Amino acid sequence: MLMTKYHPDTRFITDYAAGSLPFSQALCVSAHLHYCDDCRHKVEQLSSLGSFMFDELEAQQNDADAMEQSFNELMSRIDDLPEARFVAKSQAANDNRTQRLPSALHKLTRGDLDSLQWHSIGKYFSYSDLDIGDKARETSLFSIKAGGNVPRHRHKGDEITVVLKGSFSDQDDHYQAGDFIVRTRGEMHTPVAAQDEDCLCLSTLDAPIQMTNWFYRLLMPFIKASAQSSRV
């Protein structure tokens, strides 16, 4: 049964509902919503609430004090939103959701991952950059073969990862389809895929990762140069 443990925080959810997230981050939230009924319901609530409050603000646009009061009321109502309750879906329905890509990614890849340009780092890890027009962040799909790992690395900036298929573990926890994982500057880990299934993830980051192994650190510039020349 699909059990998502890691979710976008309130800022991500509210900014997504408001349409103010950078596209790369919005893509990650959208991918998470494909798997998570609870967060999808929260976005629907916020969108409806925001639309209602926007109409009120528009009618009061010449009254600055009223606008501030309405905004504060909106934030208060968001904090008081009830927990979503859902009727349990069948095992087959949950399993089926993990077998297909989120719709936004399906459109970006035309449903054919094999047609993408993949670059390998070691025996088990490969990635494919997605050109989505966000120059401030690098957005990629990455794959870890069953039982394999991503070479140990340090984060030089913030990264969002959403597990799309399979699962992986690191020193902190085990992550599976739908999990929305945020890493911050300075964190270091070695993701390892489950033994019985390849792992596919979506990732966006605002600064390159740094491999801790000297061999991969020497190799990375050549891999990046190859990736850039293949897009020319």
Image: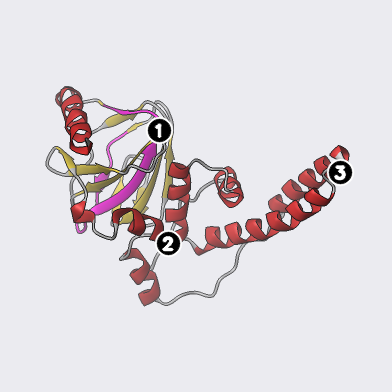
In the rendered structure, the answer to whether residue 106 lies left or right of residue 143 reads right
Element on which disc 3 rests: helix
Instruction: Name the amino acid type tagged 2.
Output: Met
Does 203 lie within the magenta span? yes
Residue 185 on image: x %, y %:
42, 27
Instruction: Name the amino acid type tagged 1.
Output: Lys
Which is more foreground, mark 2 or mark 3? Answer: 3
Q: Is residue 98 above or below residue 133?
A: below
* Numbered label attached to residue 135: 1
Q: Residue furthest front?
A: 232
Element on which disc 1 rests: loop
Sequence-first tag of 1 and 3: 3
Question: What's drawn in magenta, residue-wise?
Answer: 189-210
In the rendered structure, the answer to whether residue 59 lies left or right of residue 214 reads right
Instruction: Name the amino acid type tagged 3.
Output: Ala
Q: Residue at x 18, y 46 (%)?
A: 148
The residue beneath circle 3 is 66
Tell me if mark 2 has few (under 14), some (14-19) or many (20+) residues whose alpha carbon lies within 10 angstroms of its own: few
Q: Residue at x 22, y 35 (%)?
A: 232
